[in-house]
Image: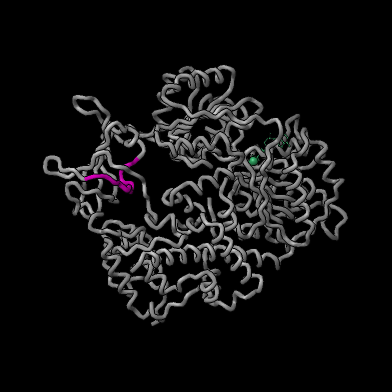
Amino acid sequence: MTPADLNDSLDRHIRIDKQHALSLAKLGIRTVKDLLYHFPVRYGDTAALTYIQNAKDGDEITLYGRIKKLKLDKTFRTKIARATAVIEDESGSISATWFNQPYIAKMYTEGEFVKVSGKIKLVKDSHVLNNPSIEKVESMPIGVGDDLFSQDGTRTEELSPIYKLTSGISSLWMHHAIQKIFTSEIFENLVDPIPDEILKRYNLPALRTALIWIHAPQKSNDALSARKRFAFEEIFLIQLQKLNTRKQLEHKTSYNIDISAKTLDAFLKTLPFTLTGGQKHVVDTVLKDLGSGKGMSRLLEGDVGSGKTAIAAAVAYSVTQTVPTGQKFGTLQVAYMAPTEVLAKQLFESFITFFEPFGLKVGLITGSGAYKFPSKVGNEKYTNISKPQLMKWVANGEIPILIGTHALIQKKVSFKHLALVIIDEQHRFGTNQRAQLANKDKFLPHLLSMTATPIPRTLALTIYGDLDLSVLDEMPKGRKPAITELVTDAKRKDMYEHIRGELESGRQAYIICPRIFEPDAQKQNVIMAKSVIEEAKRLSQKEFKGFVVDVMHSKLTKIEKEEKMEKFARGDTDVLVSTSVIEVGVNVPNATSIVIEGAERFGLAQLHQLRGRVLRSSHQAYCYLYSESKSEQTLARLQALKSAKTGFELAEIDLQNRGTGELAGGKQWGVSDLGMEAIKNLKMVEAARTEASTIIEEDSLSKYPLLEKIILTKKDIHFE
Ligand code: ADP
Ligand code: MG
């Protein structure tokens, strides 16, 4: 038998029946390591009061549970709005009622985890809670969360760990399973991947201590230290992996491209505008990278509309003016990847405009076809050609610029001299694909990745640790900011009237709703946040009667989505009612109004991005935020949209102002909730980065075999 290992299947060490195995799989627990790293979401400090079962008349309690049977109606005689719900925990359930707070029913969804505080009352033999305070908790460290990295919090209450569970697995089961591992040989032999001296430097507990402290703390301070350690560990490992990837790339050769100021100026002169200082700076930085002798790996962050395409075009142009080393003719090539067909086509058309004066050839390849500019036929600008034909021209170097969707990689396109890969809003694609594009060529193409997705700097430093960062924080001059308004029910009528005016003068509008469908019929009493389907129906019969209203959401097929988007882009649709899926970067300059229903449900950065959809033209844009929330904090948060300058600034505000529970968005970046705690802490992110880069720079990863193994087997974070 092979020696016991953390990656052993759990049932090698604990007896698990089939049902348990299924439940554990739901929680993502398969190996010993999965179990040990399934950390408590909180600690029930005064456990007796926390459980519903133990509640007594008159008790002031705080309990955590799942929300069930959410309902909104009116009291019988007084006709006061009344929201009711059942809160259920492991021990039992209790009914809760809120008077005059109908929005409660809209802000929560059945099945969600909530924290509820209030006074227990005995009504007709049952315990109830009237007007308790309520908040969402999803799955995060309550009580320890926000002071994770502070030094206070010396409480001595009982600290029983409470886990995120699923049916079939109780906290008690978890407790026993973990204790069993704690007393096993596997635990005895655990090796800490983090080097000792690093743990010492930051006063972090060693792995075994930390595991005991996090699962069975005696003091809350111990639990805090342990969480701090694991948060650090996560960020450190990501950084280490990213920096290692980067180091590997340094061994590869990229084209050394020297571009003269004259070449660049020739292109810039043809633009209908002059570059902003910010754009100029980024172009200079990129050109310097290209001529540095090393492969470029750069991420350009810039809000929607900040003019990233012009930067990409200037750089692409410059690269194509370079003759491959050792040749007398031919040019270096550029591949430009966009996330969707619509965007790829838009880019293709922009590039044609940019490069027409120079007679530069441009190709387009998507899932549905291949095109080439210039056309030899009639007065068409570009021609539909066969894919093999396009591939042939790309392979022999005749087409210097190829734009495309994922088809660029999937179709195994080969280039003759691919020098630069530009990626627009693909968030990130792995280093493998970049190498794949380079295929036969012995050179690794330079990489310019561009994003308008606002994330905080600490997160960027971590997940993009292998890239250099450029931030474009200046908008082209003369751009009118959107007029942003918080709308109340009273102002709804005016809002629709104003939008109708816009539509009548030929403009278009987006209406964003938080959900796709109305909840099922049985739950008709519950007025939930507006849904795309219902709202589109309502608007087309009422406020926007006579206009063409269409819908867009994630349940549509890819083809349907693209068709609808194209219809909207053509102006055939007046009003697009959509969830927040409307594609990042889609450019419909004629859309000037956007209404965001249930605005409190979106993060600030996301709201900012949605608003960016209507900032694509010289027309005045309008953004209406509707929220039923009466919370001052929420309203203040929404107000920040009027003052902050960039989406990245808003992402920062979001990060700092949100409670731990609301940070859960980290998952889309491959960072856990606990890891997001570290992301809130600049010092910790910097510390992790310093340590990681020291190891990589000193080339000493091999001194830490376990660390090396983890890094090399860890999947590269790859987001869609
Ligand atoms: P994004 O950064 O979202 O990709 P785009 O590159 O699509 O932004 O640019 C948005 C619009 O701004 C385009 O219509 C583009 O022509 C225009 N633009 C870009 N740079 C400038 C500039 N320096 N001055 C004026 N307009 C500009
Ligand atoms: Mg763009």
Q: What kind of colouring is applied to the model shown?
A: one colour
The residue closer to the viewer here, 158 or 124, is: 158
* Residue 247: percent from left, percent from top: 66, 67
Relative height, residue 86 to residue 420 (above, below): above
The residue closer to the viewer here, 316 or 172, is: 172
Left or right relative to 422: residue 538: left
* Residue 401: percent from left, percent from top: 73, 46
* Ligand 1 image-quadrant field: top right
Does the magenta segment cover residue 111?
Answer: yes
Q: Quadrant of residue 527?
A: top left
Does the magenta segment cover residue 320?
Answer: no
Q: Give the residue at x 19% y 51%.
A: 55
Residue at the left extreme, as displayed:
125
Look at the image and give the residue range highlighted in magenta: 108-119
Q: Give the residue at x 33% y 41%.
A: 109
Q: Give the residue at x 41% y 28%.
A: 535
